[in-house]
Amino acid sequence: MCANSKDSTNRLAPNALPTGIGSMPHKDTETACRFISETLTVAPFWPQLPQRAFRENMYVQYSEGFPGFQTDEGEKRMWVDSAILMQDLEAFYEKIISNDLDSFAISRGYAEGLYEMPDILRARHPEPLMIYKGQVTGPVSMGLTVTDENRRAIIYNEAAEDVVVKMVAWKAKWLERRMKNDVPAETYLIFFDEPYMVSFGSAYLNMTHEQVVGYLNECFEAVTCLTGVHCCGNTDWSVILDTSVDVVNFDAFEFGVGLTLYDQQVRKFLDRGGILAWGIVPTSEAVLEEDFKSLTKRLEGLLDRLEEKGIPREKVLKQSMITPSCGTGSLPVPLAEEIFTKTVEVSKHVQDKYL
């Protein structure tokens, strides 16, 4: 494992290490953090805990400081008040111009796991971790999910569009600083979670290829650590592969074939040092019908497809990670823990067999 640097990505070989997406179903923060630290010993992440509090909803969690952002925790609603947005717009940009990073902090009430995990990791892992992972909601999904008072997606609000992108970028920038200060690691990785990229190309998502690439690249450029995009369904993978992202995470269990259709873009991505994070372990009860052998066989079928198109299996696996197909925040705790156990088992089996 190399030192953390954008320039060192082409030398980073995670060799099918396991990690997670972000959300966990636990209501007790310490229990969630201890499970992660004990299970994902090489590449742990701090957990989002949406069942602990509405503030840990993946959209609300990164809303602090967003001009005009309103919540009703009782009704579990969120929206942006356009009048307040316009009123607070100048102050928002002044914070960016003055490099006031503290104004983009994620406080403990919104991300208990971010604050609880460091002590647990340092106690269990006295030496620096190989990878420490965090996550933020991506600009496309944030902009499409959060609406104004008229229930119109804020990404289509001319005044709010740039705010969404800059808000995500500066949250990631603050998060990177926090993670580096809290947990010694060789490499830091921040995923930008983009579930709504499954709608790209549909009437629901009225954005161009160039717009989405621009939104994502602005966010990636805000940090110096490695970046990832997680999308848990089919999408136009050329959009994400055309960005400067370092890690592409996808639901390989249900939709893996879709990515293999973009073999030319995948080859270029791997040639520049990109990493594929295979979400080969399903985040549903389907996992109960699988074991590490059947899941590895499914992964091998996808690797066969890439190899048939001239992309060597060994190269792909050296530049791969193994993950669940999505977050587990809405699942029962025992099922979520089973999913992570099998993720680690698949990783070990792949490493023993090929690496």
Image (cartoon, rainbow, N blue to C red):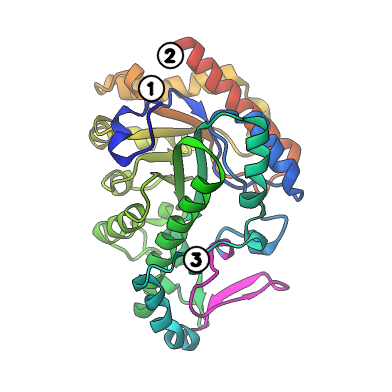
Check disc 2: other Cα within 10 Å, few if <14, some if 14-19, many if 20+: few
Indicate yes or no whether the magenta region holds residue 128: no
Assign the N terminus to one quadrant of the image: top left
Residue range highlighted in magenta: 60-81
- Residue 129: numbered disc: none
- Taking the spot 32% from the left edge, 34% from the top edge, the residue there is 9
Q: Nearer the viewer, mark 3 or mark 2?
A: 3
Assign the C terminus to one quadrant of the image: top left
**Which one is nearer the viewer's eye here, 317 or 65?**
65
Give the Cα distance between marks 1 and 3: 37 Å
The residue tagged 2 is 355
Indicate yes or no whether the magenta region holds residue 62: yes
- Give the secondary structure at mark 2: loop
Q: Amino acid at mark 1?
A: Lys
In terms of sequence position, does the residue under pointer 1 or pointer 3 come before the other? 3
**Measured along the vertical axis of the image, is residue 270 above or below residue 166?**
above
Q: Is residue 339 visible?
A: no
Q: Amino acid at mark 2?
A: Leu
The residue tagged 1 is 318
Check disc 3: other Cα within 10 Å, few if <14, some if 14-19, many if 20+: few
Label 1 close to label 3 by CB (< 8 Å): no
Q: In screen coordinates, is 129 left or right of 301? A: right
* Res 170 → quadrant: bottom left
- Give the secondary structure at mark 1: helix
Q: Is residue 123 visible?
A: yes
Check disc 1: other Cα within 10 Å, few if <14, some if 14-19, many if 20+: some
- Give the secondary structure at mark 3: helix
The residue tagged 3 is 102
List x then y, in percent, for residue 95. 41, 74
Label 2 close to label 1 by CB (< 8 Å): yes
